[in-house]
Amino acid sequence: MKKILITLFQLSVTVAVLYWVYHDPSRRAQMVEAIRNAQYHWVFLGILAYVVVEVAAAFRWHVLLKVQKIRLTLPRLSGLFLIGMFYNQFLPGGTGGDIIKSYYLLKETPDKKAGALLAVVFDRFIGLVALVAITVTLIGLRYDFLAQTTETRNLLWLLLFLLGTSVLTLISTFVISGFNLFHSLPEKFPGRDKLIEISAAYHLYAHHWRATLVAFGASLIAHLATFTTFLCAAYALGAPVPLVNFFAVMPVERTISALPISFAGIGLREKVLQIMLSGLCGVPEAKAILIGSLSFLIILVCCLPGALVYLFYKPSGAVARVKMREMEHEVVTLEHEIGEAE
């Protein structure tokens, strides 16, 4: 019942925000004109940029799995990664694809459950650290630019609050893990053994700091390539925003659209870009909204191969394809365990 209510809430938010940004007839007419005059070679370049995102993110996950002594063949690693990317576009929240990816990874490595789960969770964490590093740099360079209007200033402070909360959570997990505080929990504490197991897996990343640094570098490339995908969408629609200014806006959009209150950030993405690009860069509201939607379509096209992989994917040694009901049961369990790890 709880999941149904959450899904209904997310659907309501998605539909409401989409109506909010698309309901104006004159704005829709401007969108049609922008699409008619679009330069589609920039769309192709945007697709190439997002392919770079996928390659960098897959390589990062490969590095993190190796630290946990999990070695998959390139086809299986790529297949699991593409499945996760595909489901990230359709499941509620920003981690739905991670849950599916975790489930299939456990099918491949049932004897390394904690390491497999942590590799997925840490993959998300290292991406967050890279985003924080980029955000701090860009805000340091362009704070006055980003805080020009009341609306953009409010979004900027929301960004800082969300990232600050995430960083504090991340630091607390490292402190708890580093001092082995999970061992101090009562013997009957729910999930105590699992938390201790995950804590031990965490230590591997501290010892393999070079691999963790490589994963961080891959995260930087992935984020900057994502920003470039959106920039290509802007150029395709005739909105030549200077690169530094556009990149300064992107951490705000990326963070707020990742909030689990709509499906795949649909609606939120468009509204944030409408406020930021129109208020700061002089981009017409119709084009600013379209930049968000076109960028999502580019990402969706790049993630569609994951659907084909899912249709034909069979875990190593499996007799038959994994059933959806079985997957749903495992997903519920994984959501709880990943929540404990975070």
Image (spheres, grey):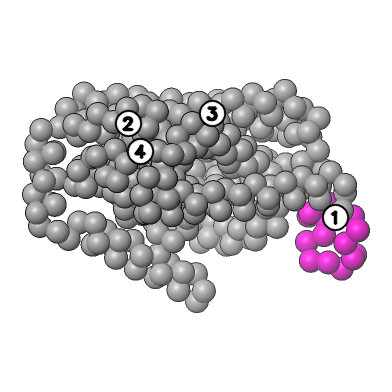
| Badge 2 density bin: few <14, some 14–19, many ≥20, Cα 10 Å | many
Judging depth in this view, the residue of 323 and 90 nearest the camera is: 90
Residue that badge 4 annotates: 299
Foreground label between 2 and 4 = 2
Residue that badge 2 annotates: 231
C-alpha gap between disc 1 and disc 4: 40 Å
Q: What is the quadrant of residue 319 in the picture?
A: top right
C-alpha gap between disc 1 and disc 3: 32 Å
User: What amino acid is at disc 3?
Assistant: Leu
Instruction: Check residue 182 in the rendering and tell me which mark sits there, or answer none.
Output: 1
Q: Count of labels shown?
A: 4
The numbered mark, 2 or 3, whose residue comes first in the sequence reads 3
Judging depth in this view, the residue of 191 and 126 nearest the camera is: 126
Q: Which stretch is magenta? A: 183-196
Foreground label between 3 and 4 = 3
What residue appears at the point 21 percent right and 23 percent down from the top-left corner?
Answer: 41
Q: Is residue 249 magenta?
A: no
**Can residue 33 be seen?**
yes
C-alpha gap between disc 2 and disc 1: 45 Å
The local secondary structure at tag 1 comes to helix
Horizontally, residue 138 falls left or right of residue 66, namely: left
C-alpha gap between disc 3 and disc 4: 18 Å
Foreground label between 1 and 3 = 3
User: What amino acid is at disc 1?
Assistant: Phe
